[in-house]
Image (tube, helix red, strand yellow):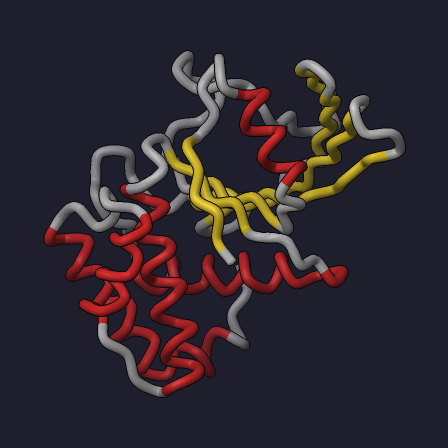
């Protein structure tokens, strides 16, 4: 299950963290090109063993692992409002998407990233939703949701309608898939997936 959210702003960090804990999220997916160094984004996830506090929440980040198309680290979240409540949640950041372009740079890397997210979310018997965030909670999150659903449907049914999947996602998130380029990118991902990607991906590494 995917939970789409807006990248936390300075004034919404506490609400974002509350959502993360209350929904027992299994993984955090950041697909923004904008980083927390930007003044419009709320500081939320410390890295390199640093500690960040916000209200009842204390967060400690792990060292960052850098790959070809993503970075990976884990965030330990402790809440003083819930006794003995400490969660460690993996955070994956997709880095192969330029700020002012409506689609990722590579369909293959995007598919690989989605497989990485699914694999990490299932580790240690995690069962909560995957929280995916971008600045408007729709344009990039929506594309991630559509492509992830396309992959899941092809794997289960060996066929899929891009139009139907896009329509279903847009029923929940109207602003998803706003551009013709994004719709075409969904087709590119299906083509990449059906041309042996699933078998080849098992041998790839970040």
The residue under the point 55% across, 51% down is: 130
Residue 108: x percent and y percent?
35, 64
Q: Residue furthest right?
A: 84
The residue under the point 30% across, 73% down is: 192
The image quarter in which residue 169 lies: bottom left
**Which residue is more in the foreground, 114 or 150?**
150
Q: Total marks drawn? A: 0
Image height check: is 187 above or below 109?
below
The residue under the point 67% across, 37% down is: 21
Image height check: is 156 above or below 54?
below
**Which residue is more in the foreground, 46 or 5?**
5
Image height check: is 172 above or below 201?
above
Image height check: is 56 above or below 70?
above
**Which residue is more in the foreground, 59 or 172?**
172
Instruction: Tell whether 85 sits left or right of 121.
Output: right
Instruction: Tell whether 19 sits left or right of 144.
Output: right
Residue 79: x percent and y percent?
77, 26
Q: Residue furthest front?
A: 171
Residue 83: x percent and y percent?
87, 29
Residue 149: x percent and y percent?
38, 66
The residue under the point 76% across, 60% down is: 124
Instruction: Tell whether 79 sits left or right of 151.
Output: right
Instruction: Tell whether 99 sits left or right of 132.
Output: left
């Amino acid at each position: 299950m995917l939970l789409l959210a807006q990248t936390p702003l300075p004034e919404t960090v506490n609400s974002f963290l509350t959502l993360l804990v209350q929904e027992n999220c299994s993984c955090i997916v950041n697909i923004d090109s904008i980083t927390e160094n930007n003044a419009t984004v709320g500081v939320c996830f410390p890295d390199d063993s640093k500690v960040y506090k916000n209200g009842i929440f204390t967060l400690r980040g792990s060292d960052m692992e850098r790959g070809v198309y993503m970075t990976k680290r884990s965030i330990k979240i402790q809440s003083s409002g819930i006794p003995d409540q400490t969660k460690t949640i993996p955070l994956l950041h997709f880095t192969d998407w330029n700020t002012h372009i409506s689609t990722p740079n590579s369909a293959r890397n995007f598919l690989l990233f989605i497989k990485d997210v699914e694999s990490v979310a299932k580790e240690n018997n995690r069962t909560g939703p995957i929280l995916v965030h971008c600045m408007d909670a729709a344009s990039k999150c929506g594309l991630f949701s559509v492509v992830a659903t396309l992959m899941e449907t092809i794997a289960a049914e060996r066929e899929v309608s891009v139009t139907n999947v896009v329509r279903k996602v847009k029923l929940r998130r109207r602003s998803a898939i706003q551009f013709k380029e994004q719709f075409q990118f969904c087709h590119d991902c299906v083509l990449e997936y059906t041309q042996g990607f699933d078998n080849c991906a098992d041998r790839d590494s970040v």
